[in-house]
Image (tube, coloured by chain):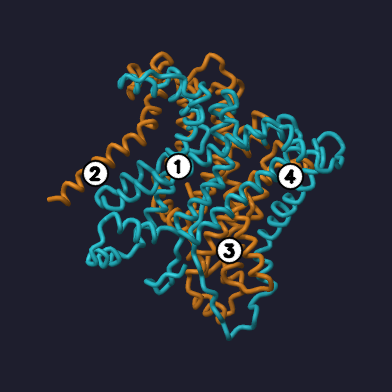
Amino acid sequence: MIKKWGNTIRHTFMIIFSVIMVYPVLWWIGASLKQNSELSSPNIFPSVPQWSNFSNGWKSVPGHSFTDFYLNTFGLELAVMIATLISSTLVAFGFARLDFPLKGFWFSLLMLTLMMPGQVLIIPQYALFHQLGWVNTYLPFVVPHMVASGAGGTFFVFLLIQFIRGIPRELDESAKIDGCSWFGIYWRVVMPLTKPAIVTVMIFCFLWNWDDFLGHLLYINSVDKYTVGLALRMINDSQSAQEWGQLLAMSLVSIVPATLVFMFLQKYFVDGIATTGIKG
Amino acid sequence: MKRSTTVTTNPKKQHSFLSRWNAPIAGYLFISPWLLGFLGLTAYPLFLSLYYSFTNYTLMEPISFVGTRNYEQIFTADPKFIQSVKVTFLYVIASVPLKLTAALLVALVLNKAIKGISLYRTAIYFPSLIGGSIAVSLLWRNLFGVDGIFNKIISVFGIEGKGWITSPDTAMGTLILLTVWQFGSSMVIFLAGLKQIPKDLYEASSVDGANKITQFFKITLHMLSPILYFNLIMAVISAFQMFTSAFVITNGGPMNSTYVYALYLYERAFSRYQLGYSSALAWIMLVMIVVATLIIAGTSKYWVFYENDTGGKKRK
């Protein structure tokens, strides 16, 4: 009997708590369909849904539509993800399977860079990319990922090392007896078995680059190269008489990709966070 | 830039049938991408920024060495530095414990409620998923504005609202609240840790007559302490670097009450292009973060416990 009551209390608490947690998001969905005058109402539902918030908001940057910004962002994401996929798996395989001089030393440096506050590197990296003429291109995002040093790069390597270490070494050895090279073992034996970890890495690579607002702010100057985040900031700054409904509508659309990824790949998400401690 | 790691130890396997190194050249080929990145985009920039911090580098003018002048100015004649350090410490000290406490408490409740756990987990994790984006910062600005719904809701309880973001007393509070709202990812980590605690520890201790509170401190917290430790360090490191929400929601205002360190760094470096001066600021930030981490690491021997692989016996 006491146990039953305990459960009821627990569930009541969790339900109330969950509602408080998601209420801002629910209100946001409603607000994206509201007129400006209605925005101060805690009511979730708009009296008359203003679908025009979405259609007008989509075109609210003069000379461009959000289609351009989404294409830019997805293009950038695709390049960054391919770069990460190749570099981080190669490096992780090297650390997890091969023995070479000074391996321990390099590995401890890798662990150290995991905890390195990224902001210390922002200024010298900016100076470096500036001298190379890379400002206002996507190279400051893609090139670091090609060498496993972009946003979260070392983390992906670490996660993959941990995962590959769990794959039995006997598989490598039998492949070796069959005459497989190290690259063959990487490509034919270990990579297919590492798929779940690779999915996790791709998810976080996508999310972190989507949210890398400071990076985009620093390196992308011209509107035709803007990412979604920069475009949102631009509408926010440019409209003095705020079209809040449009702004909230466009903001809402910008979290749809992350939400979809989460909905369909939730298993990998939770596993990734729980096993490595990576945060979402 | 928010992430943490749990402790994992992999004992090195000995392969006697192989020579000391099984792939001296192939090994370097495989790790060469990271090696290039580490040397070119981490180590070299780190030293470059140390060098810049002793110069008046501005991107446009020729660079010239100024000795310790930047540091002297920062420590003796820079009120904005002092303000930003104060604000940042306030943010770190308030947001990190609140976030971790919320994460731990909800994880404890959720660990017991088996039915519907994935639904609750989703609801609570969702803010963490979207929380770092500029979109949520814009939402927050709306929620806590003078006409925001937060004021409407509290007016039901007879509390008079105000401009939470435009008032210097509460602006930082709203930013901290935004951070704490995103406790879901820490909670998922705690939840995974709680699942690892062997059930027989609780059974054995209740046979010995331990009550729930004793069990919480002696078993739960004890076993969870390595995870708590790493969550703490990572949360502190990322809190020191807080930028997007302060930039978008308040832009450092009102009256510099949310003028966090990263914002100051950004302004010096990219509005005024004083890269030398801001490199000095960046190095001071690095030292502050390292010192904070070392302090936490120094206390860890009093409260963090590691378990042997065989289980049961603990070494301090």
**Residue B234 image point, x, y percent:** 53, 50
Report the amino acid beneath label 3: Ala
Query: Which of labels 1 and 2 is toward the front?
Result: 2
Residue B124 appears in the rendering: yes
On the same chain, marks 2 and 3? The answer is: yes
Residue B86 drawn above or below residue B9: above
- Tell me the distance, in whole angstroms, between the alpha carbons under discs 4 and 2: 51 Å
Q: Considering only order in the chain, which callout, 3 or 4, is on the residue closer to the N terminus?
A: 3
Residue at the disc numbered 2:
A11
Residue B284 badge? none
Up-down: is A117 above or below A49? below
Residue at disc 3, secondary structure: helix
Q: What subunit carries mark 4?
A: A
> Of callouts 2 and 3, which one flags the residue occurring earlier in the amino acid sequence?
2
Give the drawing colour for chain B: cyan
CA gap between label 1 and label 2 equals 23 Å
Residue identifier under label 3: A92
The residue beneath circle 4 is: A124
- The x, y position of residue A162, in whole percent, is 51, 64
- Asked if residue B209 is positioned above or below residue B155 in the image, the reply reads below
What's the mark number on residue B129? 1
Structural distance between the alpha carbons of marks 4 and 1? 30 Å
Would you say the residues marked 1 and 2 are in contact, meaning their CB atoms lie under 8 Å apart?
Answer: no
Q: Residues within 10 Å of mark 3 (few under 14, many from 20)?
A: many
Q: Is residue B59 above or below residue B283?
A: above
